[in-house]
Image: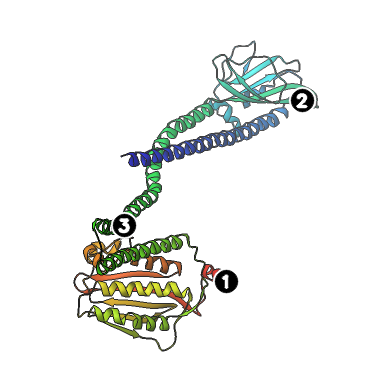
Amino acid sequence: MNQNKLFQNTRLRLALWYAIVMALILSLCGFGVYEAISHAHWMTLDRELESVAGTLHDTIELKLQQPGNLEPVIQQLLPDICVIGKSCTPEKSSSKRHILNAISQGYYYVRFFDNSGQLIAIAGTEQQELPSVFNPKSWQTLTDDKGNLYHQISFVLHTQDNKNWGYIQVGRSLKDFSEYLDAVKLILALGLPIAMVLIAIASWWLAGLAMQPIYQSYRQIQQFTADAAHELRTPLAATGATVESALLMPQLDETEAREILQTILRQNQRLTTLVADLLLLARLDRQSLKTRQEICCLNEIVSDLIEEFAAMALAAKITLTSSIRVHQPLNVVGNSEQLYRLISNLIVNGIQYTPPQGIVTVILDRSDNYAVIQVEDTGIGIPQQELSRVFNRFYRVMSDRSRTTGGSGLGLAIAQAIVQAHNGSLNVQSKLGEGSIFTIKLPFYPAPPSRNWLSAFTKT
């Protein structure tokens, strides 16, 4: 329970940090998007306002004759213009032309000032609450009493004889612009929490995925520790029991003493083998093989192992044969002792799990750039649901049978580790009651070795 709680807390912390980091990133991105949209619209707004104001300025300036005096033609250009101090009843006219139509579309306004800064006339409907005091700045952003924003530009007007007539201000209401930005803010304000909820769910799921290999590795370490303790406890308990029984005897003759010592020797050999296998697996896991890498001939290794295990196969009433299907030597770059251990583990495994009168065959062949070694037996086979576990440490298909033959369940795990250290592959095919085929593939020499193997070979 504590272990599960530990992993759940770790997963929660991972998910929380991921969500916090993503929240900061999304917030910055949202702020950046808002600023980019706002800046782009401001630039568009300035260009539009400058274009309208420039057109008005150039059109009106050509018709001005006396400073501070609005010519009648200006009323034709701006039908809704209202002169200060006179009754403002703008006439409807069909003579509005081109871009001057923008003034009558609701968002724009035009104001005329004389040289002293006094307001002369206004046109448009969006300037009623603006102050009438002239500000000489070219660009201005104003706020009226109701909090509405306006953006305007000012130009100097000249008469036809190049005298200063006064000033023209062209501006527009920012109501539509503010509404658009408010909509963007609303979308970001609503979208960010929704995105955070989705990110929280995704971060919890991703944290679970990230924790799975760690959890599996932890469980494997737990299982490995429990299995190793169990395997070590058995010979230690047997040795202790043997010594205790010997101590309880009043006297021992030579035969009894010899039997006791032989029992202790067997258990000691079992412990030595088990510890040596565990140390080998530890070295293979760290990939710290210090032995010299060399060119190894698989033909010779297979032939030597067939001779070596002939007596063992004969004692078990098993036929051990080899089938060399290549006419030239197959060489690999590796450690000869490890390769001997690799193939011998598979041969011993085949002999141990094959009933009397069975056959174990070692096949040597090649495929593309790989040397192929197959160890085929007619033994008890492996259930399909167990195939994925046969290379686990301390795993036995039949634990009782393995114990009687002295197996520790590390042979196939060591074989798998050796193959991986040699950049090869090991797989198994099996049918229950019919036998198994273990297939090894190793990159052979002189095929170009991988960079790791080349560096390991040159270092030696």
Residue 351 in picture, x, y percent from top left: 27, 75
Relative to 175, does residue 332 appear above or below in the rendering?
below
- Which amino acid, by three-letter code, is at mark 3? Leu
In this view, the residue in front, 369 or 421, is 421
* SS type, badge 2: loop
Query: Which residue is at a point 64% across and 25% down the rendered structure image?
Result: 152
Query: Label 3: how many residues lie within 10 Å, few (<14), some (14-19) or many (20+)?
Result: some
* SS type, badge 1: loop
Mark closest to the chain's N terminus, 3 or 1: 3
Position of the N terminus, as image quadrant, is top left
The residue labelled by disc 2 is: 159
Relative to 128, does residue 412 appear above or below in the rendering?
below
Query: Which residue is at a point 63% across and 35% down the rendered structure image?
Result: 47
Residue 343 in picture, x, y percent from top left: 37, 75
Query: Label 1: how many residues lie within 10 Å, few (<14), some (14-19) or many (20+)?
Result: few
Query: Which residue is at a point 20% across and 80% down the rendered structure image?
Result: 357
Position of the C terminus, as image quadrant, is bottom right
The quarter holding residue 18 reads: top left
Can the viewer see residue 164?
yes
In this view, the residue in front, 119 or 404, is 404
Give me the C-alpha separation between circle 2 and circle 3.
Answer: 116 Å
Relative to 359, does residue 386 appear above or below in the rendering?
above
Total tally of numbered discs in the picture: 3
Relative to 222, does residue 31 appear above or below in the rendering?
above
The residue labelled by disc 1 is: 460
Can the viewer see residue 78?
no
- Which amino acid, by three-letter code, is at mark 1? Thr
- Which amino acid, by three-letter code, is at mark 2? Thr
Residue 226 in picture, x, y percent from top left: 32, 52
Mark closest to the chain's N terminus, 2 or 1: 2
The residue labelled by disc 3 is: 236
Instruction: Tell whether 197 sits left or right of 458.
Output: left
